[in-house]
């Protein structure tokens, strides 16, 4: 059933976001073509196309964020919620499907933005230098971390995934809490987001202070060279992963509880 929800969510959201991707890449190509014409001394077309490109680029990220909120709110907490919750589907599946698709579009938007920037700024010499520097960096990275290189990459990816999930679920939880109120639901949702953000920051400080008093191996306490820093990096990354994981689980459980037990549809 979750697979069907994911498919439905992709179909509903792709109609909105894919045209923006196409427009952004098209404008990037237009900008590239215009800027490569040496005889073009009149810069107005290039300026206008670049302005439009930047507007679409900003609009793409705004629309991705708005779509994330709109899909959760409209699909589960407005009139559509009556239909969605009559289906034999558990609340956590609704939350999970919207979370996964929102994360997918956020990552995709970032990739599309980078591709469009690369199209505009493409230069053979600069590209060769960039590729050479990248190869050198990757080689140095694997030489330094050795067998633990894969673990380090995994930790960084996990930090990104868990952090992104935590951000999305905090918004979902705020919207769900706001809809427990009979009036001023939007204002209550904004207030809930501020409260959750404050609580998460306080918890982070508390956990950081507690972890600083925990007994640590000597190689974590003393880093006289670059290799001595490696264990500290792993320690910090796993601290962030665990903390973000706790928040992510808490937001998910809270949102699921409200949608399952305290649903207040408009």
Image (tube, rainbow, N blue to C red):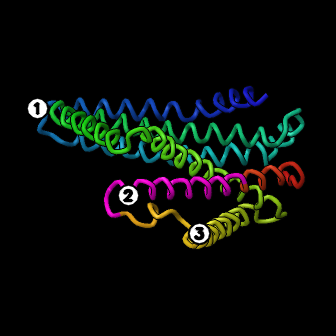
Nearest the viewer among 26 and 260 is 260
Secondary structure of residue under mark 3: loop
Secondary structure of residue under mark 1: loop
Location of the N terminus by quadrant is top right
Nearest the viewer among 247 and 45 is 247
Disc sitting over residue 228 in the figure: 2
Position of residue 224 relative to residue 169, above or below, is: below
Secondary structure of residue under mark 2: helix
- The magenta stretch is 224-249
Give the mark nearest the N terminus, 3 or 1: 1
Q: Is residue 176 visible?
A: yes
Q: Please name the residue shown 77% across and 60% down the image.
A: 177
User: Circle 3 is placed at which residue position?
Assistant: 214
Quarter location, residue 173: bottom right
Position of residue 209 relative to residue 247, above or below, is: below
Gap between marks 2 and 1 measured at Cα: 53 Å
Q: Please name the residue shown 76% across and 61% down the image.
A: 178
Give the mark nearest the N terminus, 2 or 1: 1
The nearer-to-camera label among 3 and 1 is: 3
User: Circle 1 is placed at which residue position?
Assistant: 38
- Coordinates of residue 202 in the picture (x, y in percent): 62, 72
Nearest the viewer among 251 and 207 is 207
């Amino acid at each position: 059933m979750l697979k069907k929800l994911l498919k439905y969510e992709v179909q509903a959201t792709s109609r909105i976001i894919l045209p923006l991707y196409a427009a952004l890449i098209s404008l990037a190509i237009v900008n590239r073509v215009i800027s490569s014409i040496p005889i073009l001394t009149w810069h107005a077309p290039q300026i206008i196309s670049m302005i439009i490109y930047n507007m679409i680029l900003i609009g793409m990220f705004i629309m991705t964020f708005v779509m994330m909120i709109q899909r959760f709110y409209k699909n589960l907490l407005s009139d559509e919620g009556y239909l969605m919750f009559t289906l034999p589907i558990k609340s956590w599946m609704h939350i999970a499907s919207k979370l996964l698709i929102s994360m997918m579009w956020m990552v995709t938007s970032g990739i599309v933005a980078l591709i469009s920037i690369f199209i505009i700024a493409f230069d053979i010499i600069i590209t060769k230098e960039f590729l050479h520097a990248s190869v050198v960096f990757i080689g140095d990275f694997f030489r330094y971390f050795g067998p633990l290189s894969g673990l380090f990459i995994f930790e960084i990816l996990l930090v990104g995934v868990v952090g992104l999930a935590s951000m999305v679920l905090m918004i979902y939880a705020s919207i769900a809490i706001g809809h427990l109120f009979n009036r001023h639901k939007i204002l209550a949702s904004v207030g809930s987001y501020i409260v959750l953000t404050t609580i998460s920051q306080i918890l982070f400080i508390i956990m950081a202070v507690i972890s600083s008093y925990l007994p640590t191996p000597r190689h974590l306490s003393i880093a006289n060279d670059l290799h001595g820093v490696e264990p500290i990096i792993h320690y910090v990354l796993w601290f962030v992963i665990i903390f973000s994981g706790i928040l992510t689980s808490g937001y998910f459980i809270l949102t699921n509880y409200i949608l399952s037990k305290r649903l207040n549809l408009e």
